Image (tube, rainbow, N blue to C red):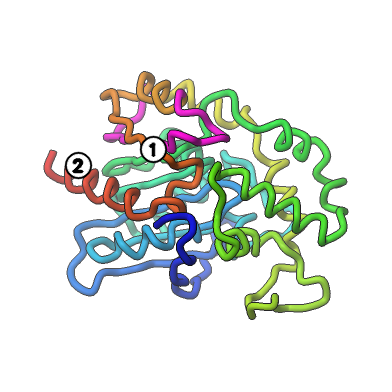
């Protein structure tokens, strides 16, 4: 899909699972026939499982596909007081995989979802059949100057006028993609972070979240490189086959980090470079991402 194409179709209605007192929005897509295996998709910040919807639909033709919105994101609980740090999110993923009854799923992770998946694997002991990492946040340095500014002053940013906040969120999302995104896609990705301003629905008839604005800044404030450094130090202990995918034009996390991951992870994982792609490969080029994943799953099953 080219960035000028219309937004892909909506995903199924979420089912909610209570994990450690946090209600997690989950979705499961199943093939019409038999399944070749189970796939868990993990999103990053400031995204939700919506970034995977086109890829998930493609994968679900042959696999059971499991999606979740981390607490603090998407349709999951965003109420103040819920821990949103990466260590806790990794523990939640481990518990959710157990709640789903999955044994060694294929795991695919994007952005900070990579740190969450690695946390479930390295800290919580969850075994994966394989792991595909797309433009992940794990190695130092990460976090733009704006990101660090918000993390330091989250309570101040949470008090911005709603219209200014909405413009900031849209601009921040747009900054992930060098060549821009369609307005409909930006609106879809921004929607969980927008407050209703006295209304329950936006002009397109979508529900808005009364905690969205403050939640946007809380999740940024909760993200800390201190939670990823121990994972980076343990990359040589990864126990499953790994492949790495990266947008060559990623403005947030440079391509060099893909090859540093390659050097640290056992087996010298292959790096799949997507030319002309920025940070949001599953949204920018879902067909290429899907093809790379299906080839990887098939290769992993044959080994």
Q: Quadrant of the N terminus?
A: bottom left
**Residue ID at (75%, 51%):** 168
Mark 2 neighbour density, 10 Å: few (under 14) some (14–19) many (20 or more): some
User: What label sits on residue 275 in the rendered view?
Assistant: 1
Examine the image and state in which quarter residue 64 appears: bottom left
> Which callout, 2 or 1, points at the residue further toward the start of the chain?
1
Q: Is residue 286 left or right of residue 84?
A: left
Image-quadrant location for residue 274: top left
Spot occupied by residue 196 in the image (x, y as percentages of width and height): 76, 71
Residue 183 is situated, as x and y percent measured from the top left of the image, at 60, 62
Residue 284 higher or lower than 8, as above or below:
above
Q: Residue at x 60, y 29 (%)?
A: 142
**Circle 2 is placed at which residue position?**
300
Answer above or below: position of 127 versus 235. Answer: below
Is residue 243 a member of the stretch shown in magenta?
yes
Calculate the distance from the C-alpha at mark 2 to the C-alpha at mark 1.
24 Å
Looking at the picture, tell me which residue is in the foreground, 56 or 179: 179
Q: What residue range appears in magenta?
A: 236-256
Query: Alpha-carbon neighbours of circle 1 within 10 Å: few (<14), some, or many (≥20)?
Result: few
Residue 30 part of the magenta-drawn span: no
Q: Is residue 142 above or below residue 54?
A: above
135 or 297, which is in the foreground? 135
Residue under the image location 24 percent in, 43 percent down: 296
Residue 189 screen position, x and y as percent: 59, 59
Where is the C terminus found, in terms of image quarters?
A: top left
Q: Secondary structure at mark 1?
A: loop
Callout 2 touching callout 1 (CB < 8 Å): no
The picture places residue 89, in percent across and down from the top left corner, at 55, 46
Viewer-nearest of discs 2 and 1: 1
Residue projecting furthest to the left: 302
* SS state under label 2: helix
């Amino acid at each position: 899909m080219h960035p000028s194409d219309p937004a892909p179709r909506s995903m199924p209605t979420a089912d909610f699972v209570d994990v450690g007192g946090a209600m997690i929005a989950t979705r499961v897509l199943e093939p019409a026939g038999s399944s070749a295996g189970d796939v868990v998709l993990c999103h990053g910040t400031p995204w939700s499982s919506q970034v995977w919807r086109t890829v998930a639909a493609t994968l679900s033709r042959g696999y059971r596909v499991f999606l979740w919105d981390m607490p603090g994101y998407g349709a999951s609980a965003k109420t103040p007081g819920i821990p949103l740090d990466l260590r806790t999110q990794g523990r939640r993923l481990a518990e959710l995989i157990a709640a789903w009854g999955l044994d060694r799923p294929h795991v695919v992770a994007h952005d900070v979802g990579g740190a969450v998946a690695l946390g479930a694997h390295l800290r919580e002991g969850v075994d994966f059949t394989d792991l595909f990492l797309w433009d992940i946040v794990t190695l130092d340095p990460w976090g733009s100057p704006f990101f660090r500014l918000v993390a330091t002053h989250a309570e101040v940013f949470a008090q911005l006028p709603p219209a200014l906040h909405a413009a900031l969120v849209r601009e921040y999302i747009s900054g992930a993609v060098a060549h821009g995104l369609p307005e409909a896609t930006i609106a879809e990705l921004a929607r969980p972070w927008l407050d209703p301003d006295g209304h329950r629905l936006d002009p397109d008839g979508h529900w808005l979240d009364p905690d969205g604005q403050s939640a946007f800044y809380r999740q940024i404030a909760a993200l800390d490189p201190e939670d990823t450094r121990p994972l980076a130090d343990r990359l040589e202990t990864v126990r499953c086959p790994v492949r790495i995918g990266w947008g060559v034009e990623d403005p947030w996390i440079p391509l060099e980090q893909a090859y540093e991951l390659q050097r640290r992870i056992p087996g010298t994982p292959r790096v799949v470079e997507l030319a002309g792609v920025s940070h949001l490969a599953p949204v920018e080029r879902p067909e290429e991402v899907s093809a790379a994943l299906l080839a990887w799953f098939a290769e992993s099953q044959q080994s």
